[in-house]
Image (cartoon, rainbow, N blue to C red):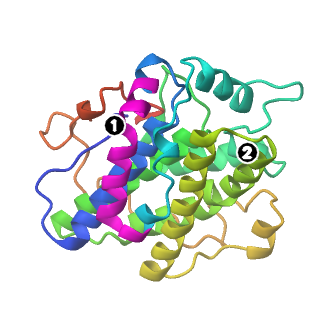
Amino acid sequence: MNPLVIDGLGSEEELHAGARSRAYAVLCEMLKFPDREQIAAIREGALAGALRASFEAVDPSVAADADWDALGDAGAADDAIAVEYTQLFEVGTSGPPCALYGGLYGGARMKTMEEAVRFYNHFGLTLSEDPRELPDHLTTELEFLHFLAFREAEALRAGIDPGPYRRAQRDFVARHPGRWVPQLVKRLARAQAGRFYAALFDVIARWLAREERTLVALVGPAPLDQAVRSQGRALPDPDGSDHRSLPVPPLQDGVPDVDEEQPHYQRRRDLGLPDHRGLRRL
């Protein structure tokens, strides 16, 4: 699924949702493997600049809390950050020390992945064939939130109730990345991660916490078993009675379908990087 950009937003509420959607898309870009293009984008400040602009459009205090110098620091040697990425996130004697898969933080990975897939499928999405990423990978989860915030902005622009998309965002953040990314931040600290990744994941954790607070203020708290969540165990089935915000209306019921031929669906060429496509339309 290409990152989406909306033109023609009018109200402050629409612009806010659009900026949040863009922030998620930029975070997906920043999580890519640091090849030469990615390293150049980090050093030139293209990624940090795009993220900062999105945060400032949402809430200037979010941007004020980030370490922007660190988010532009790819290290002196060209291969240093690539080596670090591999050591932190991809390899290890018993698996990577800082895995980017949410199902590895809680002990019931298959259930976590199955629930994530149900969320994706419910909103007309499935995993891309190439590159093939697992449903509980952080980039896939953030890409889904990018999509939901985009849908929220589109609903607002069309005069349609954005509540289903807001509730889905609230629930998905709470049950997936908002649940396990704080644990990942602690692992990164123990692994003595370099400046860029320490700053990036600190930003992601703060952003997700802010998102959850904001969404709860908009649509109320999720019907979530806080005791289960705090213990880090697998969360309940989203189709169960403890998760009353699902099911939500399907996409075809009043919400415009995604049409990537429309001019407001554009690839973010200003970043100079290929799109991440963890998700695609069913």
What residue is rendered at 81% in x and 48% in y?
Answer: 108
Depicted 269 relative to depicted 11: above or below:
above
Instruction: Give the crowd class for mark 1: few <14, some 14-19, many >=20 residues within 10 Å.
Output: some
Residue that extends furthest to the front in the rendered view of this protein: 76
Disc 1 to disc 2, how far (Cα)? 24 Å
Residue highlighted by disc 1:
46
* Front residue of this view, candidates 160 and 220: 220
Q: Which residues are magenta?
A: 39-61
What residue is rendered at 16% in x and 44% in y?
Answer: 264
Q: Position of residue 90 (x, y in %)?
A: 71, 26
Amino acid at circle 1: Ala
Residue 57 in magenta stretch:
yes
Quarter that holds the C terminus: top left
Mark 1 or mark 2, earlier in chain: 1
Q: Secondary structure at mark 2?
A: helix
Quarter that holds the N terminus: top left
Q: Position of residue 76 (x, y in %)?
A: 55, 25
In which quadrant of the rendered view does residue 195 lie?
top right
